[in-house]
Amino acid sequence: MAVRQDTIWERFLSPVVRLLIDEQGWRRYAESVDWEKESDRYRRADVTIPTYYSSQNFHGIKRGYLNSGAAVTYDPITQYVLPPNETIVRQALIDAIQVQPRRILDLGCGTGSTTLMLKQAFPQAEVIGLDLSPYMLVRASHKSQNAGLDISWRHGDAERTGFPDASFDLVTASLLFHETPTVVCQAILHEAFRLLVSGGQVLILDGNQKTIRQLDWLNNVFEEPYIEEYASGSVDAWMGAAGFGSVQTQDVWWINQVTSGIKPIVSGARSVQRNAMHYTPGDTTVDNGLQGFPLPACSILP
């Protein structure tokens, strides 16, 4: 599939962004890495790349994220296309965390920008970033090494992670859902529900669905093959259908949103929803040890 040359991105925005980024510096970085050798460290033979992911271009990049070019260009471009600021947008997910997690899984982690922030927010937690592209994982690993952060990077499909039931306190996904068909988004949320302990939290950061519905020209800016399908749906409804409770969506600077859901704590025949739990890192009321894990991420407030 060829790269579309008629998009606003290709015709107007790409030349502007090229002036803003250190293109020569990124080119030197790209040429310094043996991408095939390093990606082989992460590539798993048991991971099947789904057709929706391999058959489309994303953001004007041929074959989407299954190449080193995507891994190199993602960060310098993304910093200019997430208003008002990429860090502020990603921080909204961190600020929405209501549990004190001991194990965190970041689905569709890409180059690991949110994954690194999760580890920085919860340094004692085990943090795993999972992505379908081994090339993106190479870039993510370089970033974590440079930051001195101990993060595990895993090649895998967010629909079928292969991790045991109830093995995480927090599952997140940033800027993933608008790049997947609705049926895949729903499958990912069902997988997140399976992976979470009772009382665990799922957080989805992505484009604001209400806003994107009004911006039908957006796909002509970047090649986003599934964004109209994403915008026509509801992450809140998808979470509810997957079994999550206490589902809430908050706007992030109008163009983005963060949706939170809690896996109910089942007590006998009743299900208890956690609506007002707010823990901060270092909260001494929470056992930070891993003994007996998995356990509910938090207890119920009296």
Image: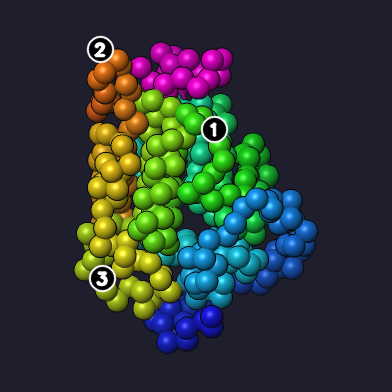
Q: Above or below — where is 22 with respect to 140? A: below
Q: Are marks 2 and 1 in contact (CB under 8 Å)?
A: no
Numbered label attached to residue 164:
1
Quadrant housing the N terminus: bottom right
Quadrant housing the C terminus: top left
User: In the image, what residue occupies the spot 53% across and 61% down?
Assistant: 50
Marks 1 and 3, the one that precedes in the sequence? 1
Residue 243 location, x and y as percent?
31, 37
Q: Are marks 3 and 2 in contact (CB under 8 Å)?
A: no
* Marks 3 and 2, how far apart at CA: 45 Å
**Type of the residue with mark 1:** Pro
| Residue with the mark numbered 3 | 215
Marks 3 and 2, the one that precedes in the sequence? 3
Numbered label attached to residue 302:
2
Residue 71 location, x and y as percent?
60, 62
Q: Is residue 147 left or right of residue 191?
A: right
Of the two numbered discs 1 and 3 in the rendering, the one whose residue sits closer to the viewer: 1
User: What's the magenta region?
Assistant: 280-302
